[in-house]
Each structure stands twice: as C-alpha cells, then as structure tokens.
Image (spheres, rainbow, N blue to C red):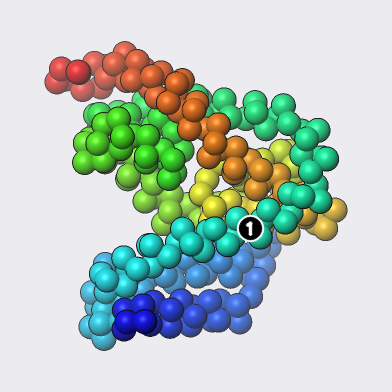
Amino acid sequence: MNRNRINVFLVVAIISLSCEIIGKVQLGKVALFPMLFAVVIGILLTPDLLGKRIGKLKAIIGEKEMKIAGDMVMLILLMLGIKLGTFVGPNLDKIVQAGPAFLAQEFGHVLAPLIAIPLALKLGLTRESIGAGSSISREASLGVIGEKYGIASPEGNGVLGVYLAGTIVGTVFFGVLGSVAIYTGIHPLALAMACGVGSGSMMTAAASSLAEAAGPKYADQVFAYASTSNMLSGITGVNILVFISLPFTEWYYKKLAPKFIKKEVR
C-alpha cells in the first residue's frame, strides 16, 4: 500500500472516529447524524479549502488522495447497498403491496424539467440546462448524458455540475430534510420513498434522520422503502430518462430558450 492510500485511510479513520464520538446531535426537532459531520469535515479538509491555508495539510490530502477517495466511494456504496438490502427482505411483503406506488413515483422524473429548465435559463444557462434539468443527475444520468452529448459538452457540464452539487451539498441537505419532513403530516413511508431519489449517501442521510423522527414503529420500513426506491430510481429511472424525460427536455428547452436567450437555439 503506497503512501497516498495510507493517507486516505488514516484521514478517513480519524474523521469517522471523531464523528462517532460526537454522536447524534439533537437541535430541537432536527437530528444531525455523524454522517453529516463527516461530510462537512471532509469538504473542509480538501485542497481547495483548508488545504490552501494549511501547507502541511495539503501534503497529506492532495490531488492524488482526492482521486483515490473518489475511486473508493463506489466500493463503500456497494457495502452500504448490501447492508440496506437486509432491511428489504423482512419487509418484502409490505413493499410488494406498495408496488404500484413505487412505479408511479418514477414518473416524477418528468416533472423535474418543468421546474428546472425555466430556472436554469433564468440563471443564464443555455444548453447546460438540458443536462442539469433533465434528471436528478446521479451516476446513471452522467452515463446517459455523457454518451449522447459527450461529458465535455455544455450538456455534459450541466449534468456534471448538478452531480457534484448533489454529492457535496445534497448529503447535508437531505440529512436535515429527513428530520424536518416528518412534521409536514405526510405519511412516513411516503417520505421514505422520496428518500430514494438521490445517491446512496444522500438516501442514507435522509432515511437515517427520517427513521429517527418517525420512531421505532416505522424505522425498519423506512430503510426498506428508501432502499427499494433508490434501486428503482437507478433501474427504471434510466429508461424514463432515455425515452421520455430527455426528449421532453430537448423539446421544452427549444420552446423556452428564445424567451430567455438572444442567440440562436440549435
């Protein structure tokens, strides 16, 4: 094991132990879990933030370490997926009963462009809005957009920008949202299904705080519904993106773009 890998494992171990020692922090009705603290600390330690100001820190967490950490994410998420799968089995009968609801929620992918495209155009994006607004922009969406337009294209820049924003900010935002959403009066299992639209880390953060807020009666079912929803978002969501959402986004963009930008729309 080379020095860069040792640095990554050492820093991750220190962050993880520190956050576990801090434990869950309750701010009124909002529960903040160690995972959220770990994400924030990890962001702060990157070369673009504290690494610029602390020279010795950059020697430990540099670009090579960042690359190794990025490659390790998929492996860790695989382990996370296996653990979450253990919640699905015992609750399989309840999940089967809710089957039509799981399938129906996938059509929510079509609603995203209705809001996202006008907002993106208003903020000054052009073709980038197609990549940014056609989906939830997770790993599968990167593949679809990258294959059709090229990851270095404006559309590729759009989907990559939303993907990075979701990875960096989404976990923290989802973790807080999971605690707050329970007080809307929406059924905990409906909220659990909504937890599954993001990446594995975003889903885990949201489901953990939601399960805590919902109480032991729904805790296991929350993780089961969130895990199943996340799996379906990755499988059926890709097909909806390719055959429905992305073509609709292209058409919608061409209709709206002349109202927001002066140059010719291709």
Residue 157 figure quarter: top left
Q: Estimate how packed mark 1 is, as few (under 14), some (14 to 19) or many (20 or more) residues with alpha carbons within 10 Å.
A: few
Viewer-closest of 155 and 179? 155
Local secondary structure at mark 1: helix
Residue 146 makes an appearance in the image: yes
Viewer-closest of 164 and 258? 164
Residue 50 makes an appearance in the image: no
Identified at 59% across, 60% down, the residue is 80
In the rendered image, the quadrant that contains the C terminus is top left
- Residue 174, given in percent of the width and then of the height, sits at 55, 51
Identified at 47% across, 65% down, the residue is 39
Q: Is residue 87 above or below residue 225?
A: below
The number of callouts visible is 1
- Residue 254, given in percent of the width and then of the height, sits at 29, 16
Q: Is residue 254 above or below residue 118?
A: above
Residue 152 figure quarter: top left
- Residue 190, given in percent of the width and then of the height, sits at 71, 38
Identified at 21% across, 22% down, the residue is 261
Image position of 248 (left or right of 24):
left
Identified at 81% across, 51% down, the residue is 90
- Residue 126, given in percent of the width and then of the height, sits at 24, 29
Residue highlighted by disc 1: 82
- Which residue sits furthest front? 1
Q: Amino acid at mark 1?
A: Ile
In the rendered image, the quadrant that contains the N terminus is bottom left
Q: Is residue 259 above or below residue 31?
A: above
Image position of 104 (left or right of 127):
right
Image position of 266 (left or right of 131):
left
